Image: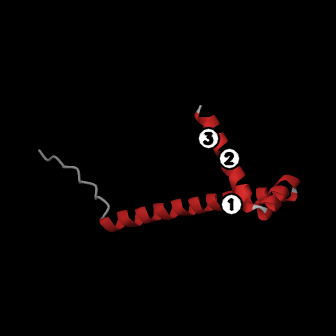
Amino acid sequence: MNIETPQPTPQPGMAERAIDTATDVSRTLAELTAALQDAVDRLSRTIATARRGEPLATISAVTREAPLASLFVAFLLGVAVARRSSR
C-alpha cells in the first residue's frame, strides 16, 4: 500500500513578507497622501471663495485691527458652544 503524503506548501520567507508589508504600507501612504491633498485643495477653494464674500473679509480686518479683542470674543464663543453641547 503506497500512500502519498501531501507536500507542505512552502511558507513565504521573511524577506517576502517584509516586501509585501512595505508594498502595502507604500500603497496606503499613497492613498492617504492623495486624500489629504484633495482635502487641502477643497479647503483652499472654500477659503478663497469665502474671502471673496463680505463676512470673512470683515472678520479678517477686525482681527488685524484688534487681535486681543478678537481672541477674547472667540474664547467667549467657544465657551458658549462648549456649554451648549455639554447639556
Among numbered discs 1 and 3, the one appearing first in the sequence: 1
**Horizontal side, residue 48 vs residue 16: left or right:** right
Q: Is residue 15 visible?
A: yes
Q: Is mark 2 on a helix, strand or loop?
A: helix
Location of residue 11 in the rendering, given as x and y in whole percent from the top left corner: 29, 58
Inter-mark Cα distance, 1 to 3: 27 Å
Quarter where residue 82 is shown: top right
Badge 2 crowding class, 10 Å Cα cut-off, few under 14, some 14 to 19, many 20 or more, is few
Badge nearest the viewer, 2 or 1: 2
Q: Do the residues labelled 2 and 1 touch (CB within 8 Å)?
A: no
Inter-mark Cα distance, 2 to 1: 29 Å
> Residue 30, labelled with which disc?
none
Location of residue 51 in the rendering, given as x and y in whole percent from the top left corner: 83, 59
Give the vertical position of 42 relative to 14 (above or below): above
Question: Which residue in the protein does label 1 denote?
Answer: 40
Badge nearest the viewer, 1 or 3: 3
**Horizontal side, residue 64 vs residue 25: left or right:** right
Q: Is mark 1 on a helix, strand or loop?
A: helix
Q: Which amino acid does label 1 sit on?
A: Val
Badge 1 crowding class, 10 Å Cα cut-off, few under 14, some 14 to 19, many 20 or more, is few
Question: Which residue in the protein does label 3 denote?
Answer: 82
Pick the front one: 49 or 35: 49
Q: Which residue is painted at 69% across and 56% down in the image?
A: 71
Pick the front one: 22 or 16: 22
Q: What element carries label 3?
A: helix
Badge nearest the viewer, 2 or 3: 2
Q: Which amino acid does label 2 sit on?
A: Leu
> Residue 76, labelled with which disc?
2
Q: What residue type is labelled 3?
A: Ala
Among numbered discs 2 and 3, the one appearing first in the sequence: 2
* Residue furthest left as drawn: 1
Location of residue 84 in the rendering, given as x and y in whole percent from the top left corner: 64, 35
